[in-house]
Amino acid sequence: MEWLEISYHATEENHELVSQIFMDAGSKGVMLEDSQVLHESYDTQCGEVYRLNAADYPEEGVIVKGYLAVMPDVAVTVERVKAQLFHLAPAAAASFTVTTLAEEDWAHSWKAHYEPIVVADTLVIKPSWLARSSDEQLMEILLDPGMAFGSGTHETTRLSLQLLTRYVTADSRVVDVGTGSGILAIAASKLGAQSVYGVDLDEMAVMRAKENVVRNDCDILLETNNLMDGVRSLGWVPNLIVANILTPIIIGMLGDVKAVLAEGGVFICSGIIEEEKEAVTGALARHGFEVVEVLEENGWLGMVGKL
């Protein structure tokens, strides 16, 4: 079946009305290319790290796209939509365009908005539909967003990944606390860690992380559990623990981290804002950790403590 992609460059003020016009015409949904999304920050919990391509977005306003199945009366429907848009904003009606798409093109057109992100010199995050790199020195983590995906690169995840590239070795036995999408556990595995365990209290997060582990062909143990019970049932002692979570949780879990981490082990933590730096470094010191490195990006911090 063929589809028509109808597109209109709306304003921030009227794009919702345009969306409703498209849906009333028969589009099951709309796709928005909003100029403001490139300048917004998002507080994500699952560590997605896709960067949106600025070239796909207008300098101002919102491009609204809808999809109509090519039926015998579709031309009449299109003319009705054009008339409604003309009455909405006569001067802007010329920005209305119609493109014919094959069904496969329609189903995957949204994927064009996602491009790989280079986290470190040898580590890249990319959607699985993009071709694999031929560079054997490059490690690629495959994570697919859904069509409703809207967050860009989150600094706390980038900081955690950058620190993992510096501290993971072939002897690393890694625990990812609050694993979320599993991205940090996957990174540790691809960086060559000896053993990797991801744990989260959220059962749905663990289910999602397991899907991502399979997608990346990694050998990682994942389960719904708490840090203490989970690690004590492993049969091995971690020498690197990573946690990309909120500051109060990081401070509250330091006693447990120290209890299960090997002597001389490393604790990587992120999710810390600049104003919380002293509180975290103080808490690390009280629990016997030496702060050996701090990275900063846009007011967010990633820290490394060593026992």
Image (spheres, rainbow, N blue to C red):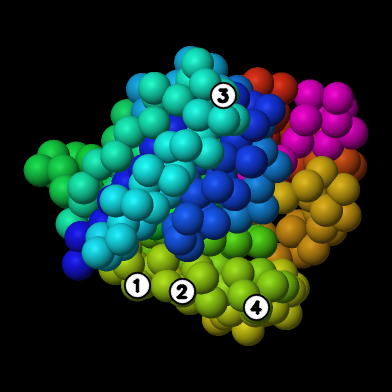
Q: CA distance from mark 2 to mark 1?
A: 6 Å
**Residue sitting at x 16%, y 43%:** 133
Q: Quadrant of residue 276?
A: top right
Q: Is residue 267 above or below residue 231?
A: above
Q: Amino acid at mark 3?
A: Ala
Residue 263 vertical position relative to residue 300 in the rendered view, above or below: below
Is 151 drawn above or below residue 88 in the view shown? below
Q: Residue 230 in the image: x percent, y percent?
A: 66, 78
According to the image, label 4 marks what residue? 203
- Disc 3 secondary structure class: loop
10 Å crowding of disc 2: few (<14), some (14-19), many (20+): many
Q: Which mark is residue 89?
A: 3
The stretch drawn in magenta includes residue 174? no
Corner quadrant of residue 288? top right
As drawn, the label of residue 214 is 1
Q: Earlier in the sequence, mark 1 or mark 3?
A: 3
Q: Which residue is mark 2?
A: 210
Point out the stretch of residues depicted in magenta.
Answer: 268-280
Q: Is residue 80 left or right of residue 71?
A: right
Residue 192 x/y as whole percent:
33, 54
Marks 2 and 4 in Cβ contact (< 8 Å): no
Q: Report helix, strand or loop for mark 1.
A: helix
Instruction: Measure the C-alpha gap from mark 2 to mark 3.
Output: 49 Å
Q: Nearer the viewer, residue 2 or 251?
A: 2
Q: Is residue 189 visible?
A: yes
For the point 40% across and 68% down, which residue is it? 213
Which secondary structure lies at badge 2? Answer: helix
Q: Quadrant of the N terminus?
A: bottom left
Please tell me whether mark 2 or mark 3 is closer to you in this view.
3
Q: Is residue 167 visible?
A: no
- Labels 2 & 1 near each other (Cβ < 8 A): yes
